[in-house]
Image: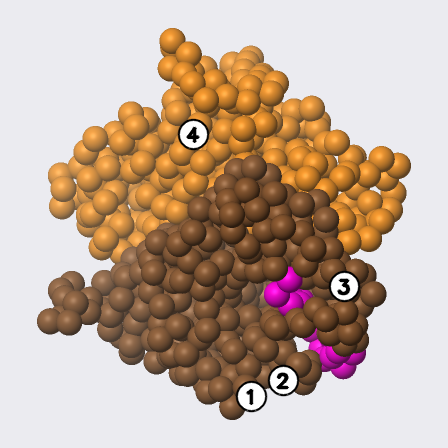
Chain colours: A orange, B brown
Amino acid sequence: MHHAADGTLIMQIAELDSPSVLIDLDIMERNLRRWQEHCNAAGIASRPHVKTHKIPELARLQISLGAKGINCQKLGEAEVMADAGLDDILVSFNLIGAAKLARAVALARRIKLSVVCDNDVVADGLSDAFAAAGMRLDVLAEVDTGGARNGLQTPQDVVAFAERLSNRPGLRFAGLMTYPPKGKVAEVRAFLSEAGELCRRQGLEPKVVSTGGTPDMWKASGYGGVTEHRAGTYIYNDRMMVAAGAATLEDCAMTVLATVVSRPTPDRAVLDSGAKSLAADLLGPGRGHGHIREYPDALIEQLHEEHGVVDLSRCTGRPAIGERLRIVPNHTCVVTNLHDRVWGVRGETVEKAWDVAARGRST
Amino acid sequence: MHHAADGTLIMQIAELDSPSVLIDLDIMERNLRRWQEHCNAAGIASRPHVKTHKIPELARLQISLGAKGINCQKLGEAEVMADAGLDDILVSFNLIGAAKLARAVALARRIKLSVVCDNDVVADGLSDAFAAAGMRLDVLAEVDTGGARNGLQTPQDVVAFAERLSNRPGLRFAGLMTYPPKGKVAEVRAFLSEAGELCRRQGLEPKVVSTGGTPDMWKASGYGGVTEHRAGTYIYNDRMMVAAGAATLEDCAMTVLATVVSRPTPDRAVLDSGAKSLAADLLGPGRGHGHIREYPDALIEQLHEEHGVVDLSRCTGRPAIGERLRIVPNHTCVVTNLHDRVWGVRGETVEKAWDVAARGRST
């Protein structure tokens, strides 16, 4: 291992032990550029969700390519990103409790912070904390456009809540935020359109209308009136995004480097990568726990904690013990959350070693 | 927060933010004592699998209560444990590659290391490395008694492999190891008995016969001829162990402290704890992602990465926004793997803050 004159790390993938998480830099950079160009053409701001990578250097890269700011789900992630110079952060989660409110105020003193909120308990807490600090916080009303998670349930609820928000000291009603359900573009459009219209009639302009998600990101302009979109997974992509039609396998930048450690039967291989490396998220019945690039017909049929059990019965070529494989995971975001470090590679060369600095910042 | 004279941390659970992982010390200590007493009575050595907690202090506690040594799945875990003074470690995983072999030799210079192996490629690597170092390594032949993971497939394969092991320089055939399938005590007994007998006929005494797993741990003496058992989950227990009949909910020491952050509909609550805090492992259809102690009829029906979506339709009492809940997870071992710290509690008092020191040591 050595460093080039520009600080780039130079080593070979062959020098890495397994399991290790590799990021193909050419693919990643192409994913980032393509989405930013699409946003530019569609007139939508990009606010990448950093939950997928949790790496400040990659957030800065997203900004340098044109992203307006970033999106965090946890205050702890936002603090790590702010420490690294990211200065426009939406925390898309209801913040509750004295500890988190004090941290939110401290964060808002040093960056442009905005948050979401869908209920009066959370709004009261934010209002008290920010008014006491002599500050005003931008708050997006979170709306449930069918995702059945957080969010106000009807456009009528939205406008009533927006009014209450705008009347509270310490807060500023900044617009609408939703995490749209997959494949329901028309329904999301109808909800956002009616809610926006009702707000405007009350003189409450939703300056920001923020949608999210990678599966439908290419359709985001179809939601209508959207000012920004929060995509996360698009930086790496994964089998779920391929299944959703948002990417191809060639767009998947993350692979887990694994080693075949056992071949107990002709049809079975066992990998040194289980649920604690690949994550157990399923894609659907019979689809397995990842795509093995070298053996596309192999099925990772079961993950124990540290063992990946592979069914080779449909393969013609079969791996030997000791062979190293690269696996496209089902869901990159949860893989990120398992590892303290990932490696940026071009071809067989390792150029980057990134600490997953915001990993484990769960509060 | 302050510290008592003996170094005990004294704070209240109310001072912890959420999500946080709590370990009820009374329950944990009872779980540890009960299993050690059972092992003592059964004449089986206990070799706890530290994958469940990944905390050196807890491994030392297990030893102080009578465990013979510990079991690690990854060399990286074993190195952390050795650094903390644990000196008898079984690494129950095929070790492959120059980097891991060099680390294994270094580890064996400072502790009593033993490993498992189920194939000649791995055996050759271990033999070359340990012979070159002028050392002999205890190796258990891993056998597949129906778990369909690693392991030699038949008793005849076992004895042939044991002979080859015992003829290799640098290695010592030390016995048999298996991870038994659940609920197959008779089948496991038959396999181990025949394999052991065949080995003995060749003058290859399997001094160690090591079984594992918490689900069937109370039946371990029924496997016949077992000298040690590797249980992991028993220290904390979880809903999977309750479902397996190995524990009751009252034996579950780990809970995840979560906060209700939204109540979008009368039947829905949303928690600040999703798959990145509770882990997504499922118990079975309709069983949900954890047991909420305060609302046992509530169903955690869906985990997003940071949101837990709860169906309250079967509850009489329902939680308010801001209410804090304690959730027994489905699978403690994967929860451990998500968090950098856990808190030891008695009643409402927090006595311990433990770093999960071996978390993320995936190679």
Identify which amino acid the numbered label 4 is placed on.
Answer: Trp
Q: In the image as oriented, which residue stretches furthest toward the top?
A: A5
Q: Which disc number belongs to residue A113?
A: none
The N terminus of chain B, quarter of image: bottom left
Outermost residue, bottom side: B41
Near mark 3 (Cα within 10 A), the count class, few <14, some 14-19 or many ≥20, is many
Could you tell me which residue is drawn at 39 percent across and 22 percent down? A60
Compare residues A324 and B334 and report the one nearer the observer.
A324
Q: Which residue is mark 3?
A: B158
Residue at 29% of width from left, 77% of height from top?
A: B346
Residue B42's disc number: 1
Chain at numbered mark 1: B
Q: Are marks 3 and 4 on the same chain?
A: no
Find residue B232 and report its horizontal and vertical position in percent: 52, 69
Residue A189 in percent (x, y) is at 59, 34
Q: CA distance from mark 2 to mark 3?
A: 22 Å
- At label 2, the amino acid type is Ser
Q: Earlier in the sequence, mark 2 or mark 1?
A: 1
Taking depth in this image into account, of A225 and B40 the one nearest to the observer is B40
- Where on the picture, by quarter, is residue A141? top left
Q: Are marks 2 and 1 on the same chain?
A: yes
Q: Which residue is mark 4?
A: A354
Query: Residue B179 in magenta?
Result: yes
Which of pointers 1 and 3 lies earlier in the amino acid sequence? Answer: 1
SS at mark 1 in the image: helix
Q: Name which residue type carries label 1.
A: Ala
Q: Nearer the viewer, mark 2 or mark 3?
A: 3
Classify mark 3: helix, strand or loop: helix
CA distance for labels 2 and 1? 7 Å
